[in-house]
């Protein structure tokens, strides 16, 4: 048995905070004893002190474990960057108990064998790991995978994230199939035909480096196409890592029309602008690129009115020597699992854009609901997957549990220290004091 005493519960469902103790048995929350309530007699009699671990959560917030539905653990094929074991450790350190992996591995997850391998590796960790499968064979954008077989084999959803789908007929067919399987389908929205150099915004940053960069129209054009298709097909569609104000507006309009669509935003896109790419170089190079301040503010407005209902990290590890290449040669992407909660607190909660329960809703409840995961709520009978953190305590970004260190936030002092991560009633991360 596990007892968590003296903490403050963050309830993202009711948008409230309250003081309470939690009793956890066999991986589930069996009792919530609010402050001022006496524990039921049968509960007191049931407790065997010798078999009970007690966590004093005084000063800590207790929230549902975070869920990240856009993650790259690079296994199989690129384990010099990250693997499932190190990725899971980074997730647990960041307060994440549920992860949905992307499928752009080598080989890609376009077949049952690779999907089975990835899922089995996930079961070896202390956290809950699911995986998407590919939309097209070999991520070539030409022929659909056997989506029905992959769904039966355990695919959480479908995506060719990393490579945009350009054939509108293929996209429509994929949406129709995903809808029939009751699975979400996610899209990386960047038209490569419009991009000279990806990872850097076509604007101040591209001028700074003397390159063509990636214009906002590359995102806007595909977002518009896929929102129209989502409305036509009724598929549950996720627009991944939105970076432009125009895409936010299009998403808001599509939702108003009744489209079953979701918007995803990364912490780096609601925190940074293209100036960071000029200052940090390849450590702030990602797809889609960091844009302008007006775009950053539009993303925050989208999060505030729930147009953007998912916060996901797009955790994308790369080796140090890869990121040390010139700006046009280095791969795009940054790691994000260990800094996401802190950035959400600093940029969204501390600045008054979201309440703490609203932040947790977008980082836990909403993504869990989208993929049918077990977490996202704190109530009696629910799975005991939790994060215990101090919202104002500071930490310096320096060392990572991830195998990679490609973060533009290195050296910064951030609020929000994770003290415990609990998945299915088991402590999977404990802060060393």
Image: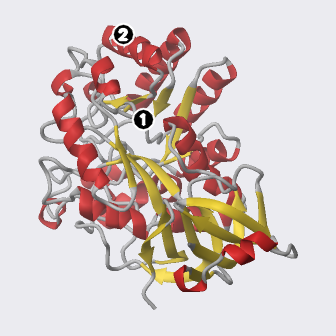
Q: Residue furthest bottom?
A: 433
**Mark 2 and mark 1 residues within 8 Å of each other at the beta carbon:** no
Give the foreground label among 2 and 1: 2
Towards the viewer: 24 or 407: 24
Judging by the rendered image, the residue that carries numbered circle 2 is 173
Secondary element at tag 1:
loop
Asked whether, in this view, residue 238 is left or right of residue 148, the answer is right
Number of marks drawn: 2
Q: Position of residue 152 (x, y in %)?
A: 33, 25
Q: Position of residue 233 (x, y in %)?
A: 50, 10
Asked whether, in this view, residue 122 is left or right of residue 70, the answer is left
Which residue appears at 72% of the width and 59% of the height? 355
Secondary element at tag 2:
helix
Which residue appears at 65% of the width and 72% of the height? 61
Q: Position of residue 215 (x, y in %)?
A: 37, 36
Image quarter of residue 54: bottom right
- Quarter in which the N terminus is drawn: bottom right
User: Quick one: label 2, few (<14), some, or many (20+) residues within 10 Å?
Assistant: some
Relative to 368, say whether 169 is above or below: above
Which residue appears at 25% of the width and 18% of the height? 146
Spatial CA span between label 2 and label 1: 27 Å
Towards the viewer: 81 or 122: 122
Asked whether, in this view, residue 292 is left or right of residue 350, the answer is left
Asked whether, in this view, residue 91 is left or right of residue 80, the answer is right
Judging by the rendered image, the residue that carries numbered circle 1 is 216
Q: Position of residue 89 (x, y in %)?
A: 33, 67
User: Quick one: label 1, few (<14), some, or many (20+) residues within 10 Å?
Assistant: many
Inspect this view and state whether residue 104 appears.
no
């Amino acid at each position: 048995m596990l007892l968590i005493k003296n903490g403050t519960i963050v309830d993202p469902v009711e948008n409230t905070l309250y003081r309470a103790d939690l009793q956890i048995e066999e991986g589930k929350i069996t009792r919530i004893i609010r402050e001022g309530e006496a524990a039921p007699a049968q509960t007191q009699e049931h407790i065997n002190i010798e078999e009970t671990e007690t966590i004093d959560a005084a000063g800590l917030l207790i929230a549902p474990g975070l869920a990240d539905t856009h993650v790259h653990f690079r296994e199989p094929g690129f384990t010099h960057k990250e693997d499932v074991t190190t990725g899971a450790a980074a997730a647990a350190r960041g307060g994440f108990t549920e992860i949905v992996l992307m499928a752009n591995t080598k080989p890609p997850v376009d077949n049952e064998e690779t999907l089975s391998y990835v899922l089995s590796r996930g079961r070896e960790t202390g956290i809950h790991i699911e995986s998407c499968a590919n939309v097209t064979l070999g991520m070539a954008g030409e022929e659909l995978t056997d989506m029905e077989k992959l769904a039966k084999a355990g695919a959480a959803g479908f995506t060719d994230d990393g490579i945009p789908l350009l054939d509108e007929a293929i996209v429509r067919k994929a949406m129709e199939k995903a809808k029939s399987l009751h699975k979400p389908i996610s899209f990386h929205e960047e038209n490569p035909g419009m991009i000279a150099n990806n990872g850097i915004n076509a604007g101040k940053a591209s001028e700074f480096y003397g390159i063509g960069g990636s214009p906002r129209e590359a995102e806007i054009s595909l977002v518009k196409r896929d929102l129209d298709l989502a409305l036509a097909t009724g598929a549950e569609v996720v627009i991944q890592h939105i970076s432009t104000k125009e895409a936010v507006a299009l998403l808001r309009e599509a939702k108003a029309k009744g489209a079953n669509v979701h918007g995803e935003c990364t912490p780096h896109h609601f925190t940074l602008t293209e100036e960071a790419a000029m200052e940090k170089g390849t450590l702030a190079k990602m797809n889609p690129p960091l844009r302008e301040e007006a775009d950053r503010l539009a993303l925050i407005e989208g999060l505030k009115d729930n147009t953007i209902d998912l916060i996901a990290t797009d955790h994308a590890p790369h080796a140090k020597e890869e990121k040390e290449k010139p700006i046009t040669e280095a791969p795009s992407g940054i790691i994000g699992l260990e800094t996401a909660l802190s950035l959400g607190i600093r940029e969204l909660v501390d600045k008054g854009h979201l309440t703490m329960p609203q932040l947790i809703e977008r980082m836990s409840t909403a993504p869990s609901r989208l993929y049918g995961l077990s977490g996202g709520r704190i109530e009696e009978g629910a799975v005991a997957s939790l994060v215990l953190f101090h919202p104002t305590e500071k930490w310096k970004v320096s060392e990572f549990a991830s195998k990679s260190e490609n973060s533009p936030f290195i050296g910064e002092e951030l609020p929000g220290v994770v003290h415990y991560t609990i998945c299915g009633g088991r402590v999977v991360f404990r802060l060393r004091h």
